[in-house]
Image: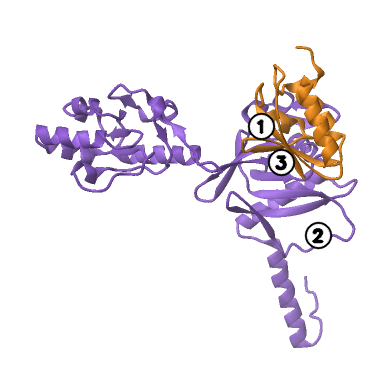
Chain colours: A purple, B orange
Amino acid sequence: MKAKQISLSQVITDCKEFLHLKSLNRHTDSEYVVTRSDIGVPGLILAGLGSAPHRGQIQVLGENEISYLKKLETEQRSQAIARLGELDVPCIVLAGSDADLDTLAEDFAKCEIPVLSSDLSMTQVLQYLSSYLEVELAPEITLNGTLVDVYGVGILLRGPSGIGKSECALDLVERGHRLVADDLIKAIAKPPGVLIGRSVAPLQNYVEVRGIGLIDIGSIYGIRSLRRQKRIEVEVNLTHWEKGVSFDRSGVETSSTEILGIRIPSVIVPLVPGKSISVIVEVIALSHTLKTYGYDPTTELDRRWLERLKARARKGFEPRDTE
Amino acid sequence: MIERDVRIINKLGLHLRAAAALVQTASGFESDIHLRKDEIEVDAKSIMGVLGLEAGQGTEITIIAKGSDEEDAVRAIVGLIEARFNEEE
């Protein structure tokens, strides 16, 4: 997998509105790239201490660093700012009130690297930038399968081509669920341990049904049948029924699959004629929700059954059902 | 399993009709056939997948086939691409 990066100009375009970014010097942003989602705070570098920050890491100065700079003598201050300007990083963001910057703006304008200001507090800038970068720089993979939001659970339908993933998705949409992506899914791993899937942009809303061709789900079923992106929570593998291959019968054993290092539960559903896959998928989604609420029906049944067997062994006879 | 690189040479690239022709050809074979471009790998028997490659003119793609008729499958797909999907330009 290639290490991901994003150009500074893209970061600025995407964050400008929210962070109220203003440029303090003129630089062609396109040559600068951000490769890290964590943000540096070069306080010690201002004081002439500390080692150089990571390349590709955005640096943010907050209220403390700025008031420190203001307290310095003019010459010292210019030197401190010049030290920052020589760093091999994509940009420096000055956070906090704009009005505080008047005396410093001139020195920052001379910096070699782009300097931006935001009137939000440093905490807000750090939070927003790092959550934005975490998504943009998250490891990405393309999956073959169909992603549907079923009762709020992201179900990833997989299986060989022609087995009926798209038809199943169509049936689910008909039953009021929402399509995220058919056939080709872009998945990213968002920390901590969340897998997010979305469709390849131009194919959004479309499903291929053999015999009909491409279908625009959005125009047939309306906007409520669609969803832009969804956390992928359960994998459902559709397979052909084969004699001799054993499938999970009790639900005690749970299997899982790993995508981008994130483990999600996986269910194998064998297909036989006349079986309604969409109903089964709905049940899988609901039982996953039950489990996330802390109730596992199989464990519960197992517990009750063991109790019954124990009681029976103790008394030597079958307890009378009083219910 | 065999792999072969091929360049998309027709003017419009893998547009809808061309993608449909490719899927049609691929579906005629038993083998598992995938197409790869950069880090994206798609099922050659699915039109959504093939469109998802967003392969325009000049794009290099890799055909990966695995199965009893893999040789024939790759030859047929390469032939189709090199014949510019039998379209007039």
Left or right of B88? Residue A95 is left
CB within 8 Å, label 3 to label 1: no
Looking at the rendered structure, the kind of residue marked 3 is Gly
Q: CA distance from mark 2 to mark 1?
A: 32 Å
Looking at the rendered structure, the kind of residue marked 1 is Leu
Q: Residues within 10 Å of mark 1 (few under 14, many from 20)?
A: many
Tell me the chain of label 2: A
Q: Residues within 10 Å of mark 2 (few under 14, many from 20)?
A: few
- In the image, residue B18 sits, relative to residue A210, either above or below, namely above
Left or right of A12? Residue A108 is left
Q: CA distance from mark 3 to mark 2?
A: 21 Å
Give the residue at x 67% y 61%: A296
Give the residue at x 83% y 36%: B73
The residue pinned by badge 3 equals A145
- Of the residues tagged 3 and 1, which is closer to the observer? 3
Mark on residue A62? none
In the picture, the quarter occupied by the N terminus of chain A is top right
- Of the residues tagged 2 and 1, which is closer to the observer? 2
Q: Element at badge 3?
A: loop
Looking at the rendered structure, the kind of residue marked 2 is Phe
Mark on residue A247? 2
- Residue A179 visible in the snapshot: no
Residue A242 in the image: state x and y as whole percent: 88, 55
- Of the residues tagged 3 and 2, which is closer to the observer? 3
Residue A204 in the image: state x and y as whole percent: 66, 29
Q: Residues within 10 Å of mark 3 (few under 14, many from 20)?
A: many
Give the residue at x 58% y 42%: A196
